Image: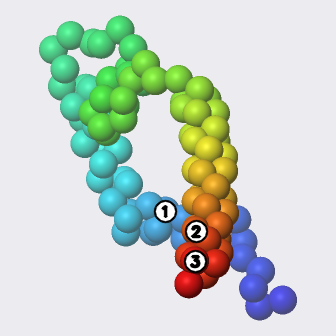
């Protein structure tokens, strides 16, 4: 059981990961920016999203559904292209 970690060591490992990846610095900057705003924004979460570069007012679920639909359409079109290429090859071989 050498892989067992205490909750404290897991937390410390995760904290180091966040620090190394720059998450802590980015969050600190956005919170300092929010603190230094002369007028508090009405929606702090939207402020943080804008500051971090995320679009606001986007319906993520509808984008996921649209993405899934587009993936299905691409798959269907790829299959159609493959079938047409086979038919074209067969037609060229018949002419030869």
Task: Please tell me whether residue 78 is drawn above or below residue 27 in the rendered image.
Answer: below
Q: Position of residue 24 (x, y in %)?
A: 36, 53
Residue furthest toward the bottom?
2
Between discs 1 and 2, the one toward the N terminus: 1
Q: Are marks 2 and 3 in contact (CB under 8 Å)?
A: no
Task: Please tell me whether residue 71 is drawn above or below residue 51 in the rendered image.
Answer: below
Residue furthest toward the front?
95
In the image: residue 57, left or right of residue 28: right
Q: Position of residue 93 (x, y in %)?
A: 60, 81
Q: Residues within 10 Å of mark 1 (few under 14, many from 20)?
A: some
Local SS, label 1: helix
Question: Residue at point 77% right, 80% down?
Answer: 4
Task: Please tell me whether residue 22 is drawn above or below residue 59 in the rendered image.
Answer: below
Question: Residue at point 58% right, 42% down?
Answer: 70
Q: Nearer the viewer, mark 2 or mark 3?
A: 3
Local SS, label 3: helix
Q: Position of residue 76 (x, y in %)?
A: 66, 50
Image quarter in which the N terminus is found: bottom right
Residue pointed to by mark 2: 88
Q: Label 1 vs label 2: CA separation?
A: 59 Å
Query: Is residue 24 in view?
Result: yes
Residue pointed to by mark 3: 95
Q: Residues within 10 Å of mark 3 (few under 14, many from 20)?
A: few
Picture disc at residue 15: 1
Q: Label 2 vs label 3: CA separation?
A: 11 Å
């Amino acid at each position: 059981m050498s892989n067992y970690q205490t909750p404290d060591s897991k937390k410390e490992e995760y904290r180091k990961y966040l620090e190394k990846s720059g998450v802590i610095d980015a969050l600190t900057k956005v919170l300092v920016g929010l603190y230094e705003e002369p007028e508090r924004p009405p929606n702090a979460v939207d402020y943080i999203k804008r500051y971090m570069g995320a679009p606001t007012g986007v319906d993520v679920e509808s984008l996921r559904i649209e993405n899934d639909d587009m993936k299905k359409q691409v798959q269907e079109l790829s299959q159609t292209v493959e079938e047409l290429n086979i038919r074209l090859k067969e037609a060229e071989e018949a002419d030869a």
